[in-house]
Image (spheres, rainbow, N blue to C red):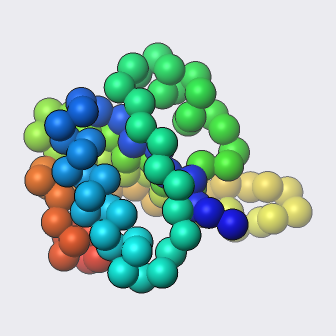
Amino acid sequence: MKNKIALYGNHKKLNQIEDVLSGYLDENDVPYEIHRISDSEQFLREFLIKDDYLLFIISEKGSVSYLLKIYKNFDRKTSRYAYGKLNYPLTQNELSEE
């Protein structure tokens, strides 16, 4: 099963983020599927509310914010989240520290 990742931001920044992220995930043998969007309303409507996305990354104003979905209780489908900010341009070292 591939881990679904949603990226939001401008095209240039998303290229850099996707390159670093995919390099890190490939290096660690993590299966993934990346979906990119540049429209905030569509991002909220189509990506954020879906249960099958594991990681959300938003690039705005010189920083990169992320929201990582973690399921604590599978029977009740209770969701927990980890979140934070990273610097742009994103590096694999910074990504691995988070």
Image coordinates of residue 61 in percent, x first then y, are 14, 33
Question: For this rendering, which residue is in front, 60 or 16?
Answer: 16
| Vertical order, 3 against 40 (above or below) | below
Q: Residue at x 13, y 51 (%)?
A: 88
* Residue 11 picture quarter: top left
Question: For this rendering, which residue is in front, 96 or 37?
Answer: 37
Q: Residue at x 24, y 45 (%)?
A: 15
76 horizontally vs 39: left or right: right
15 horizontally vs 49: left or right: left
Residue 61 seen from this side: yes
The quadrant of the image that shows the C terminus is bottom left
Image coordinates of residue 6 in percent, x first then y, are 47, 44
20 horizontally vs 38: left or right: left
In the displayed image of the protein, which residue is found farthest to the bottom?
28
In the displayed image of the protein, which residue is found farthest to the right?
75
Q: Residue at x 63, y 34 (%)?
A: 49
Image coordinates of residue 38 in percent, x first then y, are 35, 26
Image coordinates of residue 3 in percent, x first then y, are 58, 61
| Vertical order, 2 against 85 (above or below) | below
Q: Residue at x 47, y 50 (%)?
A: 34
Residue 81 seen from this side: no
The quadrant of the image that shows the N terminus is bottom right
| Vertical order, 76 against 31 (above or below) | above
Give the number of marks: 0
